[in-house]
């Protein structure tokens, strides 16, 4: 497989090879769904907390005596049966983390990259070097590369200028190859990878 190598102006300056082992697999919807679900679950904070009858303030005194009132017996106004009482079986702080085998996450990433290569949303550029942290330059590059909607920029190493310049561009995210996962690849409509990042990606996954 081959892809066009573009410059920052969107002009073709050559060709790059896309290894079949990384960009030529048939995606499995079952595997990608499993990995995506786990990735979203791992982002949940799990900090929701409701108070039980022991934690709600008040209710230490019996509201009325046990017998001879004509009313139902109660021991606390903070019972779950009462308004402003405790909550039964409500959410409590917990972890939603789902651990998956490394080989399964790696295979899902390869299949996600293959899906992006097959649907034509993959762009390979020579570099994404900027003169400074200027949002205007990033916007011009995205326009030249015809990137619409949510776009993911993949680099081989951290570029502070690129990260700062892309913050104000809507639906644009910068990631290094080391932090790339299947969910981020599937969540974007446009995947822009630098040539150096592509070589590093091939070395890690091939």
Image (cartoon, rainbow, N blue to C red):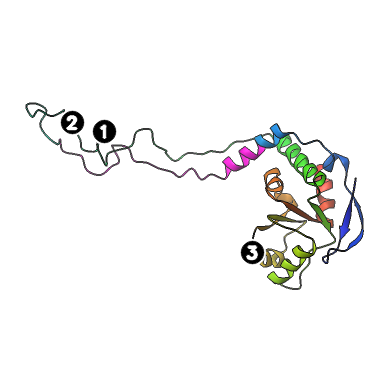
Classify 10 Å Cα crowding around label 1: few (below 14), some (14-19), many (20 and above): few
Identify the residue shown where x is 56% and y is 38%: 97
Classify 10 Å Cα crowding around label 2: few (below 14), some (14-19), many (20 and above): some
Q: Which residue is mark 1?
A: 81
Above or below, comparing residue 4 to residue 141 in the picture: above
Q: Which residue is mark 2?
A: 74
Under tag 1, what secondary structure?
Answer: loop
Confirm whether residue 133 shows in the render.
no
For marks 1 and 2, the one nearer the N-term is 2
For marks 2 and 3, the one nearer the N-term is 2
Say which quarter of the image contains residue 128.
Answer: bottom right
- Quarter holding the N terminus is top right
Above or below, comparing residue 160 to residue 64 in the picture: below
For the residues bearing labels 1 and 2, Cβ distance under 8 angstroms: yes
Under tag 2, what secondary structure?
Answer: loop
The residue sitting at the left extreme is: 68
- Quarter holding the C terminus is top right
For marks 1 and 3, the one nearer the N-term is 1
Magenta span main SS: loop
133 to the left or right of 46: right
Q: Nearer the viewer, mark 1 or mark 2?
A: 1
Q: Which residue is mark 3?
A: 167
Identify the residue shown where x is 70% and y is 45%: 186
Confirm whether residue 2 shows in the render.
yes
């Amino acid at each position: 497989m081959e892809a066009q190598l573009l410059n920052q102006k969107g002009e073709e300056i050559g060709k790059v090879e896309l290894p079949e082992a990384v960009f030529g697999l048939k995606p499995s919807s079952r595997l990608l769904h499993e990995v995506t679900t786990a990735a979203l679950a791992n982002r949940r904070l799990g900090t929701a907390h409701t108070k039980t009858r022991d934690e709600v303030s008040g209710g230490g005194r019996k509201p009325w005596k046990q017998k001879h009132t004509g009313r139902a017996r109660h021991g606390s106004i903070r019972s779950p049966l009462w308004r402003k009482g405790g909550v039964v079986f409500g959410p409590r702080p917990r972890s939603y983390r789902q651990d998956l085998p490394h080989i399964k996450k790696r295979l899902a990433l390869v299949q996600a990259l293959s899906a992006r290569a097959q649907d034509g949303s993959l762009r390979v550029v020579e570099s994404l070097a900027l003169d400074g942290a200027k949002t205007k330059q990033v916007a011009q590059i995205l326009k030249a590369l015809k990137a619409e909607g949510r776009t993911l920029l993949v680099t081989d190493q951290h570029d502070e200028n690129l990260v700062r310049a892309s913050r104000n561009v809507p639906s644009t995210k910068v990631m290094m190859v080391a932090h790339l996962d299947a969910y981020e690849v599937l969540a974007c409509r446009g995947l822009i990878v630098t040539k150096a990042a592509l070589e590093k990606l091939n070395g890690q996954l091939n």
